[in-house]
Image (cartoon, rainbow, N blue to C red):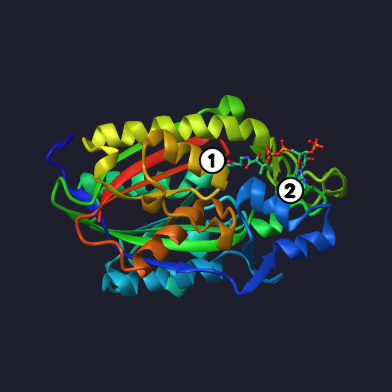
């Protein structure tokens, strides 16, 4: 394993939050031309959670963050850095991480957001890990939080069925080299920036212009089939890269926790990596695709299952808009 003698970063606590309102495949049958059968066969999804109409991501991000600090046994004042990954911030200005700082009580932390779409949680992990390695911070928090339902186009049956809302947070602390996060691999290819996108809502097509809304610009758009093919290859390559950097093989991985975009993608990648289904964690049937919250939500379930011991190896991997793709091997 590559060890440069610098401090590593260990996840010492994780917390999650799902909004109460649920949206089932049957509910979609009432509003678009689809069936429960099609959605289950093509995606594996059954239920998603949606925030209330007067709610953004702040509430669930705070709930997840507080749970993560409680699980870590860390006081809010000990957190020196909060990096929040989201594609659906509470509002454009200021950063959601700043908005939630008082509610989290992390008064000593520098707080900012990053946009890595579905790879956001691993991007945040990689960012925080660098600050820990240099000794700049010892204790930090990463959060992945999304309210994708607010930007789902309920006139587009190929995308609206996919997305759900939720949040997950992890507290990281400096640890000995060779423990905690063993590797991160991360990539971007902006040549494909238009295959998963929300063209409106930013500075080019601001959301308050009537024509932009009429042209349905502030909604998520995806060329699903093209994304699917790219995703399988990118997932595979980035997992192999992260495993190689950590110097471990798939046989040593206790849990493969992939971004929950599509069961067929997860199965294809698991097959090619040679990881048996019993060691692949899937929860997309309960939450849908929650972008940057996807991996921590799944990790929360793995922890709750009691089937993760100190020292176990976890492989996390994600793929999404940007295009972005990333993977990390973590010693629990
Ligand atoms: O998180 C970021 C990364 N995202 C992903 O990795 C998502 C990757 N892509 C996918 O998961 C899949 O491409 C989808 C689930 C989005 C779509 O599945 P697909 O098997 O690629 O379907 P398709 O787009 O090729 O469409 C097949 C057919 C089309 O009908 P025709 O043209 O063959 O008559 C669609 O109109 O399925 C139709 N269709 C639907 N039918 C019933 C599309 N959406 C629906 C629907 N219900 N909800």
Image-based side of 223 in relation to 169, left or right? right
Q: Secondary structure at mark 2?
A: loop
Compared with 115, 71 (above or below) is below
The quadrant of the image that shows the C terminus is: bottom left
Identify the residue shown where x is 59% and y is 24%: 191
Q: Which mark is residue 265?
A: 1
Ligand 1 quarter of the rendering: top right
Would residue 177 be found to the left or right of residue 109 on screen?
A: left
Q: Looking at the image, which is closer to me, 37 or 158?
A: 37
**Mark 1: C-beta under 8 Å from nearest atom of ligand 1:** yes
Q: Of residues 107 and 69, which is closer to you in this image?
A: 69
Query: Residue 209: x, y in percent?
Result: 83, 48
Disc 2 from disc 1: Cα separation: 24 Å
Circle nearer the viewer, 2 or 1 = 1
Q: Residue at x 18, y 34 (%)?
A: 2
Question: In the rendering, at what x and y percent does residue 26 appear?
Answer: 75, 64
Report how many numbered discs are placed on residues in the image.
2
Counting other residues with Cα less than 10 Å from the Cα at mark 1, is it few (<14), some (14-19), or many (20 or more)? many
Residue 284 at what x, y percent from top left? 55, 56
**131 lies left or right of 170:** left
Q: Is residue 186 visible?
A: no
Position of the N terminus, as image quadrant, is top left
Q: Which residue is mark 2?
A: 219
Q: Position of residue 268 (x, y in %)?
A: 50, 37
In the displayed structure, 36 sits above or below 323; it is below
Query: Where is residue 264, by image quadrant?
Result: top right
Tag 1 or tag 2, which sits nearer the N-term? 2
- In the picture, the disc for residue 178 is none
Q: Nearer the viewer, residue 146 or 48?
A: 48
């Amino acid at each position: 394993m590559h060890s440069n003698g610098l401090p590593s970063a260990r996840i010492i606590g994780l917390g999650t939050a799902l909004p109460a309102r649920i949206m089932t495949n049957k509910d979609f049958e009432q509003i678009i031309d689809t069936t429960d059968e099609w959605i289950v066969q093509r995606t594996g999804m059954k239920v998603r959670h949606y925030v209330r109409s007067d709610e953004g991501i702040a509430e669930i991000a705070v709930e997840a963050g507080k749970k993560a600090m409680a699980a870590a046994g860390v006081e809010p004042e000990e957190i020196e850095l909060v990096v929040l990954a989201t594609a659906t911030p509470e509002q454009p200005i200021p950063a959601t991480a700043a908005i939630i700082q008082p509610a989290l009580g992390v008064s000593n932390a520098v707080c900012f957001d990053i946009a890595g779409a579905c790879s956001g949680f691993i991007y945040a992990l990689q960012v925080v890990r660098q600050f820990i390695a240099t000794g700049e911070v010892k204790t930090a928090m990463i959060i992945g939080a999304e309210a994708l339902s607010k930007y789902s186009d309920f006139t587009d049956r190929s995308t609206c069925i996919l997305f759900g809302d939720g949040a997950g947070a992890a507290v990281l602390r400096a640890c000995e080299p060779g423990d905690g996060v063993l590797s991160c691999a991360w990539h971007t290819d902006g040549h494909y920036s238009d295959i998963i996108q929300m063209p409106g809502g930013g500075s080019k097509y601001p959301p308050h212009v009537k024509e932009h809304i009429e042209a349905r610009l502030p909604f998520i758009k995806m060329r699903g089939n093209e994304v699917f093919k790219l995703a399988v290859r990118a997932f595979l390559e980035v997992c192999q890269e992260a495993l190689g950097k950590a110097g471990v093989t798939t046989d040593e991985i206790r849990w493969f926790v992939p971004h929950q975009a599509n069961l067929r993608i997860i199965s294809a990648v698991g097959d090619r990596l040679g990881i048996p289904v019993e060691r692949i964690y899937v929860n997309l049937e309960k939450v849908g695709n929650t972008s940057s919250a996807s991996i921590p939500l799944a990790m929360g379930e793995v922890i709750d299952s009691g089937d993760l011991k100190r020292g176990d190896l976890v492989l996390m991997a994600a793929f999404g808009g940007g295009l972005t793709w990333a993977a990390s091997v973590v010693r629990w």
